[in-house]
Image (spheres, rainbow, N blue to C red):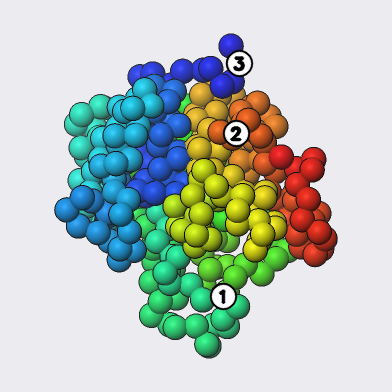
Amino acid sequence: MPETQRTLEGKVALVAGATRGAGRGIAVQLGARGATVYVSGRSTRGRRSEYDRPETIEETAELVTAAGGRGIPVVADHLVPAEVEALVGRIDAEQGRLDVLVNDIWGGEVLFEWESTVWEHDLDKGLRLLRLAVETHAVTSHFAVPLLLREPGGLVVEMTDGTAEYNAANYRVSFFYDIAKSSVLRMAFALGHELGPRGATAVALTPGWLRSEMMLDHFGVTEANWRDALTKVPHFGISETPSYVGRAVAALAADPEVARWNGASLSSGQLAQVYGFTDLDGSRPDCWRYMVEVQDPDRPADTTGYR
């Protein structure tokens, strides 16, 4: 059976930080394969988070169900251990298993400052960024991994920005941002060391230039006319929808040989070449190769051969 047709029916996933962006795309694509997906976050129809954006976990859950799975929204602040413990306890009580954990909690867009040194960056914002991007993942893994290990073949996906190879050679945005994304990469490596001998797999995964709700708003475009932004930012042509990295996670979750990736740093474009999935428009953007070969050397924007 082709990779893109393997089913996840009977599988249970937790996408921590599924309100919008990559988290929402991942949750929906797991649902499209038939999984039961618990979607957690702080933004609900009754109360917005500090982002003050309209997306909610209820909407994400409804999209999961509409895609063919079962979406279950759960309000949780992943900086509060008791709330995460209660979330995992609920999954245990209702399902008795957890097959996929996606740590996608982030929350840093309103906190980081571009090209700001450690002494210039707002300290409170920088430290909160680290808590939201790193501490939340550790808290969630602490409570969720024991349930995931109950059955063999579990998968933990640590979501980050940039591959280990790229981030090792490039300064990423600012001191706090750089540390946050590199820490998550190392988390996946450490989890792989701990999970591998116990029959589970951990990976780090990065999307490329993501056409998230916030990014589209930033450029003043929609998914329908996103190419209009290329007049101002030509390299945006390599961008991808959240569904693309969502399909990467779904392919990993459905792969009986997923252990081959244990501890590795992966990208959506890389996995598309292996598993054969595409973005919603049928293309296969390979953003990180494009970054190295076209954008970073300051060559003219041209996605030919990269999507």
Q: Is disc 1 surrounded by few (<14), some (14 to 19) or many (20+) residues within 10 Å?
A: few
Q: In terms of depth relative to the viewer, which is nearer, 200 or 59?
A: 59
Q: Which residue is under mark 2?
A: 281
Q: In terms of depth relative to the viewer, which is nearer, 162 or 60?
A: 60
Q: Which residue is under mark 3?
A: 2
**Identity of the residue drawn at 35% across and 19% down:** 10
Q: In terms of depth relative to the viewer, which is nearer, 300 or 78?
A: 300
Q: Earlier in the sequence, mark 1 or mark 3?
A: 3
Q: Which mark is residue 81?
A: none
Residue type at mark 1: give it: Trp
Residue type at mark 3: give it: Pro
Q: Relative to 176, is 9 on the left or the right?
A: left
Contact between labelled residues 2 and 3, with CB atoms less than 8 Å apart? no
The residues tagged by marks 1 and 2 sit, at their Cα atoms, a distance apart of 31 Å
Q: Which residue is under mark 1?
A: 114
Quadrant of the rendering where the N terminus is positioned: top right
Q: Helix or strand or loop: what does disc 2 sit on?
A: loop
